[in-house]
Image: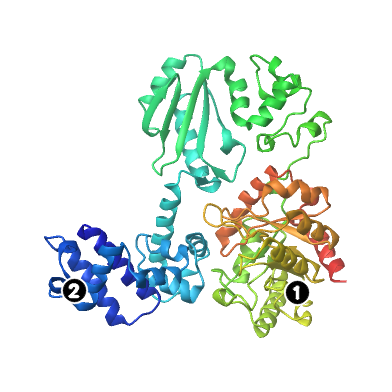
Amino acid sequence: MENKPIARKLRLLSQLMELHVVNPFKIKSIANAAFNVDKLPYPVASKPFEELEKISGIGKSVAAKIIELVQTGTMVEMEELLAATPGGVVEMMAIKGIGAKKVATIWHEMGIETVGELFYACNENRLIEAKGFGLKTQDDIRKAIEFKMASSGKFLYAQVEPEADRLMDKLKGIFTNALIDFAGEYRRLCEIVNELIVIVGSRDQDIASQSILHSDLLNNLSVKEHRITGETDNGLKVVINVVEKRFFFRTLFIQTGNDEHVKAVLGRGGDDADQPENEELIYQKAGLEFIRPELREGTTFIERAAKKQLPRLISFNDLKGTLHNHSTWSDGINTVEEMAVYCRDELKLEYLGMCDHSKSAFYAKGLSIERVLQQQEEIDHLNKKLDGFHIFKGIESDILNDGSLDYPDEILKKFDFVVASVHTNLKMSEEKATERLIKAIENPYTTILGHPTGRLLLSRNGYTFDYKKVIDACAANNVVIEINANPLRLDLDWRWHQYALEKGVWLSINPDAHRNEGFLDMHYGVIVARKGGLYKERCLNALSLQEITQVFKTQKK
């Protein structure tokens, strides 16, 4: 065995010991030994114990570990510490700019156990308040995680959007008379994008292809039969298909919808549109109303299109207010007043729902009963002060392991509305998790079920439960389901929006904002809501101030 692998495992052992707060002198001796072994000009694996213990910076204890490592390929102490450490915590130690000491703080003091949770905490600005961290460290960690996520070849829609806008601007600068549009996952508004597909329709394919190849649009360009591939600076794969103008809309249609959708439309007669002047003609030939790109997943909306019963999809302008937001009372950055003024003056909204964390969320400065009452006094004062705007008193109440909420009824009834969310113990069996959620839904004070699965896209799988039973329970108890607009969540998953709507359940596009800029995430919430087929008539925060006030009053009765 060479020195480097031995040094690497000794270094890992010292880091694990630091994570578990082992004797600091022992940690230092192992770390020093790892450094010394790495620099030795001869292989330590060939040395007997008697010689190893005499090497400067090694000694008897480390010599024994090296012998154990050479003979077995591991160390019992290291394996025991690894077994006692969540895999996500070990993974954090590989992030550039974060050592074992900081990981220990993140794990033990903040309760964060995965890289995804850490990334989410960075976006919520929670790291800057932890000992040994600051704004720069938090930003460096966030960027390092983004780079790591990108290396998997998968990107959040929110990460792709600015790249796509820049690329489109450059393409339009090169081709002033060409037809250009996006296709594939990005045009369908998928929450995860594997590659960005662009269709360019030109009178001369050869000239257009050569123009792209000789541009600085992308890195690592290659071409095969007018299909050009490359990547952006952050590693996003881009495919540009150059076609003759007369085939542009047919190609755009074929490369936008998923295979099942395209096959179904062409099979109904859409194939008769050989050189269509627009995509609408393809659907017309198939006897269908035009289906928006975001709905082109499978055949879900095809029968409705045949009956001209497609929904008028919700838009950002349909939203009248914003619910589920966090201020400086818990883990937010802006005060309640700052958030209210921003929503009123910048976003032209009618109301704000404050939902700071409840008392169980110690990691996010959750509100004790005393602080709940103090915040409500402040909101009463602000509602008298602010003209043409209203702040609703809400809370994001933790759903405890048994499904109960973490305030007594006499406190819950003081809120205008309650968002009930799971934040801990995400590894229950499907049966137990379903029971837990249904009990919370059946609580008469629960207004909205918050981010139902608890997923963090590209980093943490969601909470496993029986979707149909939970959605049915929401229908039976008049509980709204949240579409959490944070680009890392986008939860409830769009694939369940139609089932919820068919059952009579309302949805609410909630930004879960922790600062004023976070309200802009409603843009992504609207995108995923459109993908799920949501229309304004069934979106809670598309109601006017007068309408939603009545809804909250009715539920409280």
Q: Of residues 514 and 487, which is closer to you in this image?
A: 487
**Is 345 or 260 nearer to us in this picture?**
260
Mark 1 or 2, closer to the camera: 2
Q: Secondary structure at mark 1?
A: loop
Residue 320, compared with residue 405, is above or below; it is above
Q: Position of residue 79 (x, y in %)?
A: 39, 68
User: Horizontal and vertical percent for residue 181?
Assistant: 56, 29
Horizontal side, residue 125 vs residue 437: left or right: left
Residue 432 visible? The answer is yes
What label sits on residue 154 in the rendered view? none
Residue found at x 84% / y 71%: 556
Tally of numbered tags:
2
Q: Are marks 1 and 2 in contact (CB under 8 Å)?
A: no
Residue matched to label 1: 415
Amino acid under label 2? Ile
Residue 454 location in percent, x, y?
62, 61
Q: Amino acid at mark 1?
A: Phe
Q: Residue at x 53, y 64 (%)?
A: 124
**364 displayed left or right of 146:** right
| Residue at mark 2 | 58
Q: Quadrant of the N terminus?
A: bottom left
Colour pattern of the rendering? rainbow
User: Whole-percent x and y of residue 289?
Assistant: 77, 28
Identity of the residue drawn at 46% across and 29% down: 171
- Kindly state the secondary structure of the residue where label 2 is placed: loop
